[in-house]
Amino acid sequence: MRPALARGFVIMALAAGLGACTATPFDVLLRGGRVLDGSGAPATVADVGIRDGRIVEIGDLGTRTAADTVDVTGHVVAPGFIDPHTHGRERLRDIPTADNLIRQGITTIVDGNDGSSPLPLGPFLDSLAQWDVAPNVALFVGHGSVRRQVMGTANRSATPDELAAMEALVRQAMADGAVGLSSGLFYVPGSFAPTEELVALARVAHAAGGIYSSHMRNEDDSVLAAVTETLRIGRETGIPVLISHHKVGGRRNYGRTVQSLALMREARDAGVTVAFDQYPYTASHTSIASIIPAWARADDGLEGHLARAATRQRVLDEMQAFVAMRFSNDPSKIQLARCGFDATLAGRTLADVLAARRTAVSPEAISALILELVRRGGCSAIFHSFDEGDVERLLASPYGMIGSDGALVAFGVSSPHPRAYGTYPRVLGRYVRERRVISLEEAVRRMTSAPASMLGLADRGRLQPGAVADLVVFDPATVADRATFEAPHQYPVGIPHVFVSGVAVVRNGEVTGARPGVVLRGRGRAAP
């Protein structure tokens, strides 16, 4: 046995014949890497043998042969990263290789987040299975989409018949293969739903083995009340709860992650399964229309409210209060990412736009500009309003996992949030190697076995014989993000190889064009 291989690391082979003939060549053999199995255990130097899309053996495979042998000495070999929070499912038709995601080491993406998903889900998943894409894909059923189909954007509670109709849609989506129910309670129409409605729908999802993932109702002044509501849903239904992209906005709220984590700890001690995902940035990315109060957008009635003096003033007052709280009335903290009606606005801040118009900065000018942009067709925007201390506190918590909240983007188009290119390498480079906020082993666990366990992906997220060969190889000394808010279209470095089902989708740092990804359906999928 080579002395470089860790003592005591026993060569493991699959039972039931998969690895019975140890002389059989492998399809792929990764030699000499530091194996991190995703459990949080220390790395062990070993070879990894892959055959028929699965990991077959791990250990000293020095005399073995393979159709494709890759020397990964000095690199970490880990399970492929599972991103529980992504956006851009429809763009997989145009960008099936998902370059900006797989180059980060992401091998499985979960969409349908923030309450938005296709309906019905079954036909979409069936069509997606025919697209031939690089990553594996799973979907939530979105509460907002369900509510919109039954009630439109009505600002009221559901009638018993409407609630029954929503339950039926969730039940069907779970049978179609959804991994759970997502909500976007910050957005219309999810913001109009009472907690009791969410409890009822979460019960349906839980009965089918799903989880509940929530973009909570509030992430600033009332964040603790929002966490409490989310935990209530888990407590009353028994459903595992995943708080989406946990963060706290507005300077006066910095540090409230201390209390939010305490609430989660108390809930976990009481038997609630709760976790959160996060991205390692101090800015978010969503529609600029979210600054307009939700009530003013109910029943698609914004123009009517703006036409009436009394309600127009209320809209403006609430917008200005929000901008003051979140951004301290600083328009440079709101950066336009994409405006469909004017591509030249991408990357510019509201301060840039006001300056170009020679308009003095004031709360009135900021709110008027936002309304103008929305009425011209809308924009997505990046909002700088979070604290680095909260980012690191959450990263240090064992309750968390990593999720990019990233879009699938075309290289060079618009000005997306850098999380779309850099989330996972940023954690490994900045927060593991440089800042030492968490260990490498724990970071990999947050990216692999933690989301796999939460989502019920039994044969992914761990590097062990029998598991699907979704793997990432990275250099812990050099892995880093390069995307910035000013120049987001930059791929990371230090991730030379990525495999999906044993097929290289990134090789020597380049996308291969292979598309071995599969649709992953939830535990409640009905038998065909």
Image (tube, helix red, strand yellow):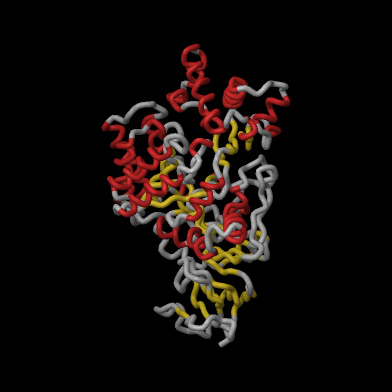
Residue at image x 67%, y 52%?
Answer: 482
Does 469 sit left or right of 193 as displayed? right
Does 85 sit left or right of 485 as displayed? left
| Residue 88 shows in this picture | yes
Does 14 sit left or right of 164 as displayed? right
* Residue found farthest to the top: 309
Q: Where is residue 49? Give x, y as percent.
A: 54, 76
Q: Quadrant of residue 412?
A: top right
> Nearest the camera: 439 or 34?
439
> Nearest the camera: 13 or 513?
13
| Residue 89 shows in this picture | no
> Nearest the camera: 453 or 66?
453
Give the answer, above or below, for where 271 lies relative to 351: below
> Nearest the camera: 433 or 13?
433
Q: Where is residue 111? Give x, y as percent.
A: 48, 48
Placement of the N terminus among the 4 image quadrants: bottom right
Q: Where is residue 490? Give x, y as percent.
A: 68, 51
Q: Where is residue 492? Give x, y as percent.
A: 65, 56
Give the answer, above or below, for where 305 lies relative to 431: above
Placement of the C terminus among the 4 image quadrants: bottom left
